Amino acid sequence: PVATLVLAFMSSKVPEKLLRMAGSLGWAHRIEKIPDRSLEKWITGIFREEGAKIAPEAVAVIAEHSGGNLQAIEDAKDKLILYTLGRDRIEASDVEQLLLSSRSADIYELADALWDKNAGRAMRVLAQLESQKTEPLFINTILVQQLRSLIKIKAITSGGRRMNSADVASMLGMQEFVARMQMARAKKYSLREFEEALALCVEMNALLKSSRMPSYLIIEQSAMKIMSLHV
């Protein structure tokens, strides 16, 4: 048998001298990240290679919630092909039912744990999301959506204004039961604290896209910072 040495550099800042040396001794290849504008075309292509047809709307949902994670997209492809076996085409509703619904529920549970300052529960939910290979940027997106909703509710119900859940639901275009739950959550933090939590989630987003730190460690550290805002 012939031994082969493979060196993989997880950075775009590999010295050109090192690349030239690798190229002279063997084979050097630079793998670039797929640009956002090309991601949907790539997704369509990998389904086509498996003989599966997928609706453009379904491709868009996968692209939006994958955060560009190609392994997560490959995993989603395998699950969707099995889930829709015997059907002519994979639709956006299939992606939402199979991949997003249960994970969204888990992320909402994570958000509840954060607002309740229940670190044990938050870490258990995070571990479950990681075992499901939930895309970290999808977690960040749901948390940001939650916080923006809470900030709006906090703003319109502050200043002594008496508003019920029906009023809030009408103003924000949400169902009344959602408004009722969000109003209860909004009482747990001040407006300033929710704004600080949102700033931490924006910082989390930047780290998830640029840091070499493990993604779930970034989320865990951000979660602990959010829970420490209100003691």
Image (cartoon, rainbow, N blue to C red):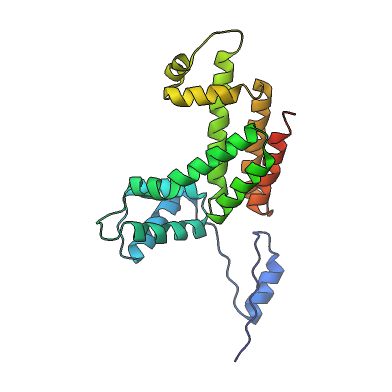
Seen at 68% across and 29% down, the residue is: 196
Q: Is residue 229 above or below residue 57?
A: above
Q: Nearer the viewer, residue 221 or 165?
A: 165
Direction from residue 72 to residue 50 in the image, left or right = left
Q: Is residue 1 above or below residue 84?
A: below
Location of residue 14 by image quarter: bottom right
Q: Nearer the viewer, residue 100 or 218?
A: 100
Q: The N terminus lies in which quarter of the figure?
A: bottom right
Residue furthest to the bottom in view is 1
Counting labels gives: 0
Seen at 39% across and 62% down, the residue is: 46
Counting from the top left corner in percent of width and height, residue 188 is at: 64, 24
Residue 141 seen in the current view: no
Q: Is residue 134 above or below residue 226?
A: below
Location of residue 206 by image quarter: top right
Counting from the top left corner in percent of width and height, residue 78 is at: 41, 61
Q: Nearer the viewer, residue 49 or 80?
A: 80
Seen at 48% across and 23% down, the residue is: 179
Direction from residue 93 to residue 142 in the image, left or right = right
Seen at 61% across and 9% down, the residue is: 159
Counting from the top left corner in percent of width and height, residue 143 is at: 57, 37
